[in-house]
């Protein structure tokens, strides 16, 4: 074997290693990419729950820890009464299963919105972020704690992954 043959053999092996390395890099990049296809709603309606510690958030909305959550009724019609809690259980569909992600939830409240005591403008939009994982089951709800929250009409719960809306559920708050 000549020096030229050796050089060509070494160059050929180097090109193969480069091609294999590039293929592995592409394959591993695809494995790390997260895709969220949609939100799967598992159940929705009225819920009962034991409330733990509560505190008001920056918007004046009472936020409580909830334990022992129980699905009481499957409905999209919600009576406007203090103590009523409505919402849903959902799962994020996407790849790869188990990947940690953030989903933004947006509650759209019908006009005129909430007139929070002391606030200059009524609230028509409430945003929260759920840190969850693809394939994990989550619970989200809204509970009427104050009379100024009892706004009749269509309430819409949207789910966003980045700039893409991946799910929605509508409820109608009605007179009891």
Image (cartoon, rainbow, N blue to C red):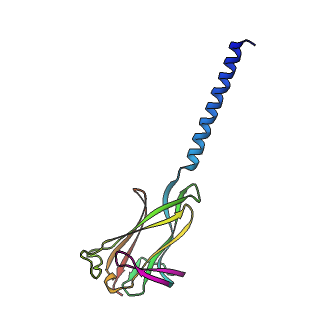
**Image point (35%, 78%), residue name:** 60
Q: Which residues are magenta?
A: 52-70
Q: Position of residue 69 (x, y in %)?
A: 53, 80
Query: Residue pushed farthest left?
Result: 120
Q: Quadrant of the N terminus?
A: top right
Q: Is residue 106 above or below residue 45?
A: above
Q: Residue 148: where, in percent of width, then height?
A: 31, 83
Q: Quadrant of residue 153?
A: bottom left
Relative vertical location of residue 15 with respect to residue 37 in this rendering, above or below: above
Can you see residue 70? no
Task: Look at the image and tell me whether residue 127 can be seen.
Answer: yes
Percent position of residue 118, x then y:
27, 81
Residue 92, x across and y down, in percent: 52, 62
Quadrant holding the C terminus: bottom left
| Magenta highlight: main SS | strand
Q: Quadrant of residue 6?
A: top right
Q: Nearer the viewer, residue 107 or 156?
A: 107
Q: How many labels sit on residues?
A: 0
Q: Nearer the viewer, residue 68 or 166?
A: 68
Q: Is residue 146 left or right of residue 64?
A: left
Towards the viewer: 14 or 43: 14
Whether the magenta-drawn stretch holds residue 107 is answered as no
Q: Is residue 110 left or right of residue 138?
A: left
């Amino acid at each position: 074997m000549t020096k030229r043959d050796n050089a060509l053999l070494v160059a050929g092996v180097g090109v193969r290693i480069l091609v294999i390395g590039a293929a592995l890099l592409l394959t591993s990049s695809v494995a790390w990419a997260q895709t969220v296809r949609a939100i799967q709603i598992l159940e929705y309606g009225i819920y009962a729950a034991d409330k733990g510690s509560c505190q008001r958030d920056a918007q004046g909305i009472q936020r409580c820890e909830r334990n022992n959550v129980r699905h009481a009724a499957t409905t999209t019609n919600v009576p406007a009464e203090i103590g009523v809690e409505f919402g849903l259980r959902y799962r994020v569909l996407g790849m790869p299963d188990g990947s940690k992600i953030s989903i933004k939830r947006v509650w759209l409240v019908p006009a005129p919105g909430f007139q929070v005591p002391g606030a200059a403008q009524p609230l028509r939009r409430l945003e929260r972020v759920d840190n969850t994982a693809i394939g994990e089951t989550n619970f989200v709800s809204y509970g009427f704690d104050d009379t100024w929250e009892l706004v009749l009409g269509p309430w819409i719960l949207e789910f966003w992954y980045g700039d893409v809306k991946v799910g929605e559920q509508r409820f109608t708050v009605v007179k009891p």
